[in-house]
Amino acid sequence: MSNTKVDILLLGSGGREHALLVKLAESPRAGKLYVAPGNGGMDVMAKKVEGLDVESPVAVADWAREHNIGLVVIGPEAPLVAGVADAVRSAGIPCFGPNGDAAQMEGSKKFAKQVMARAGVPTAAYRSFTDQESCEAYVRQVGAPIVIKADGLAAGKGVIVAKTLEEALEGVQECFSGVFGDAGATVVVEETLEGPECSLLALTDGRTVVPLATAQDHKRALDGDKGPNTGGMGVYSPVPEHLVSAEALAAMVDIEQRVVAELASEGITYSGCLYGGFMLTAEGPKVLEFNARFGDPETQVVLPRMKADLVDVFLACDNGTLTPDMVSWDDDWAVSVVLTSAGYPGSYEKGKVITGIEKAEALEGVTVYHAGTAVADSELVTAGGRVLDVTAVAPTFEEARARAYEACALIDFEGKTYRSDIGLRAVR
Ligand code: AMP
Ligand code: GLY
């Protein structure tokens, strides 16, 4: 790899992007850093690009060309599905993140299911429907429990795990009613899988797949996995062996390799991060979903444990030279607790002053990644449902968990809400 510095444009505004920015900034190859739109914590490390439409392929490619950007890193799914990576690559600029065709692995659940079937990858049995009547008839015939999913991107909201037939039919009705926009025009109906969940992020250049560490997200809003689904309330890494055996891990890696190889055989190069969400069933891991990007909040526990020059690694994903030796791991554990605004994932208030982050970060191994924050009148305030990701890294799981919660207690804002049981599943 050359040693020349590259100027980087990072797209996104969440805790995931803050964690990516911190890791990119550590690279000796990082030149000027730009972020669009960013959040209240990223401006200190990167220049905020005002007014750039990050979902417009032409706008992003033009901006990157005009500013001599050497690497565009795409955090969230919407720009990927919109084809921003295609436009950036067409402009001759290296890009981290799959092109639009490959991003369909996240952008269309039906597409992903079809690829999985051709790749021989285990996943829940399913049927897809484009008209409400036949969908309802099928749901009545199969009965509950059953899972209803809007086909397209629905910001993490288009999945209904129905315990009763009524809930299932309500879910079908909701999808077809248009609340998820075009995302719900096609509906996927799946069998319900059971077991603990596990995420496995992998980096790939379209040929070589380098698995990153396992992580376990906590998707429900309340302790004990109660309450509505959210974008993720907390996470830890790695997932211990009593939950993910070496055999299960090997099976998950094999699944991701097979998907990338299947896409390649169909003429689709998948380069970037492939996020596999798995259910660890009695019959082995089965795919719940694929995402075409890093997970949020998984990234906030995986990247701090990763030893790699992220600029080199991302460029290698883009230009087809990724090798497994580019990434190694330290033995530490990481736990991240998400501080949310009261009411999330429903409606919540914004603009509450945040204090105590410096005290929290003074604790050993603690990093506070910003998610929904903004700076208003030179004060840091809340600006979203998920506000901060309080992450602690330590030699043992227990220390990491205790340190993360100690840090959470030092931070204050009106309406601060968080789960108290993040990571308890890792304790036998
Ligand atoms: P997804 O966005 O597809 O990951 O779905 C969100 C959440 O819904 C997952 O993390 C699971 O908890 C749950 N889920 C999705 N599909 C299934 C399934 N087939 N069986 C049981 N739970 C599921
Ligand atoms: N942590 C779930 C996701 O990133 O989709």
Image (spheres, rainbow, N blue to C red):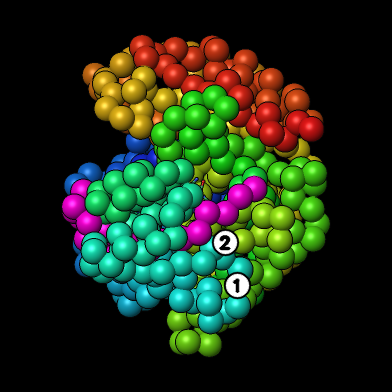
Picture quarter with the C terminus: top right
Please say if 258 is above or below 37: below
Can the viewer see residue 368? no
What x and y, as percent, mark residue 409? 55, 12
Q: Measuring 54% from the left and 12% from the top, which residue is drawn there?
A: 410
Please say if 238 is above or below 57: above
Cα–Cα gap, marks 2 and 1? 8 Å
Q: What stretch is highlighted in magenta?
A: 176-195
Please say if 53 is above or below 208: above
Q: Return the mark for residue 287.
A: 2
**Is the residue under label 1 in contact with that under label 2 (CB below 8 Å)?**
yes
The one of 2 and 340 positioned closer to us in this rendering: 340
Q: Return the mark for residue 165.
A: none
- Mark 2, Cα crowd under 10 Å, few <14 / some 14-19 / many 20+, is many
Q: Measuring 50% from the left and 29% from the top, which residue is drawn there?
A: 226
Q: Is residue 313 left or right of residue 128?
A: right
Please say if 390 is above or below 96: above
